Amino acid sequence: MPNKNTALTDIQKYELCLYAHNNKKTRTQYVDWIEQKWGFRVNESTITWILQSKEKQLTTEITKSEAKHHKPVTVPVLELALKEFVLCYQHKTILSDAILIEKAKILASELEVPQGMLQFSKGWLQKFKEHSANENAIAEALLLLQNKCAEYPPDRIYNMDETGLFYRLESDRILATKSNAKAWILTTLFQEWLQEFNYQVSIKHNKQRILLLLDNCKSYKIDTLVLENVEVCFLLPNTTSKLQPMDSGIIMSFKKHYRYHHIK
């Protein structure tokens, strides 16, 4: 069958890179995999071009599930910092547009963004919201997650997430906050935990494979690990606030109980 000049969408590129990350194949085998999965073929040169940027594809922002190209963000580090602020406080208080814009201005000052580079208008804020949680991408990512989970019984599906805990944190009523980089899990610690987890679930489930859901934290590197009993499924970038079970109240509940007992 002759190759058709068909372009992969962003989410298809992500799926290909994720498949290649976990399955070492030849370029021809990847072409066959694409045809079997989506019903069309691409050139092997396309495979080469996509996989050359595999790490970027696995961590980049997917703004629209059908998009063929990415729209660059003016100051990516600012949007990332603002996203972290939203994830931290969205379950604690009402984040109005005015609060988000003021916080963005504070972050811009801390990051030394040149004055006048961003207008912080309602239009800018709307674009930020679209970048942060595109409903189409989330819906498609949810479908992929449901299909993957359907391959396992519920008792063999696990989820893990990390969080920073400021164990002496007092009551906070100011807008500006600073993150503690040391609070995030290190790659070596994660790998040690994952190997021990692989051993423990092999005993619990009589060496039946289990599914482990993880977000796209940069510390989560599994390239060099041999996991006979664990299949790792990484959630799509920028969907964890909606799809990560741990972000759906478990971590927030833990921190609220901790703070309550701390200030009691």
Image (cartoon, rainbow, N blue to C red):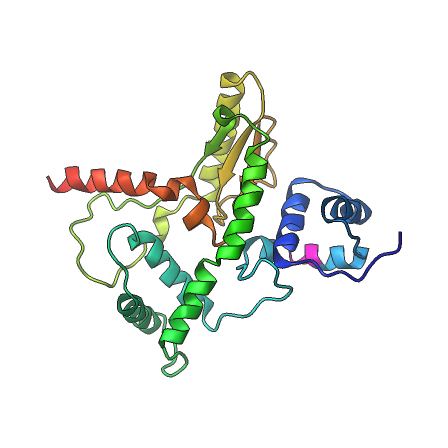
Instruction: From the top left corner, tell me how far across and down residue 36 is, in percent.
Output: 76, 44
Q: Residue at x 51, y 44 (%)?
A: 220
Instruction: Decide: is 62 above or below 153.
Output: below
Residue at image point 47% right, 31% down: 158
Res. 89 in view: yes
Residue pictured at 43% horizontal, 37% vertical: 160
Quarter the C terminus occupies: top left
Q: Is residue 221 visible?
A: no
For this view, does 130 lie left or right of residue 222? Answer: left
Residue 98, percent from left and from top: 27, 69
Question: For residue 186, what is the image quadrant?
Answer: top left
- Above or below: residue 175 compared with residue 88: below
Residue 54: x, y in percent?
Answer: 64, 54
Q: Position of residue 226 (x, y in %)?
A: 61, 32
Q: Is residue 216 magenta?
A: no
Total tally of numbered discs in the picture = 0
Say whether residue 118 is left or right of residue 166: right
Q: Is residue 255 left or right of residue 205?
A: left
Figure check: 218 above or below 214: below
Between 57 and 145, the one nearer to me in the picture? 145
Magenta extent: 50-54
Residue 37 occupies quadrant: top right
Is residue 51 within the magenta segment? Answer: yes
Per the picture, the main secondary structure of the magenta-coloured stretch is helix
Residue farthest bottom in this picture? 116
Residue at the right extreme of this rendering: 1
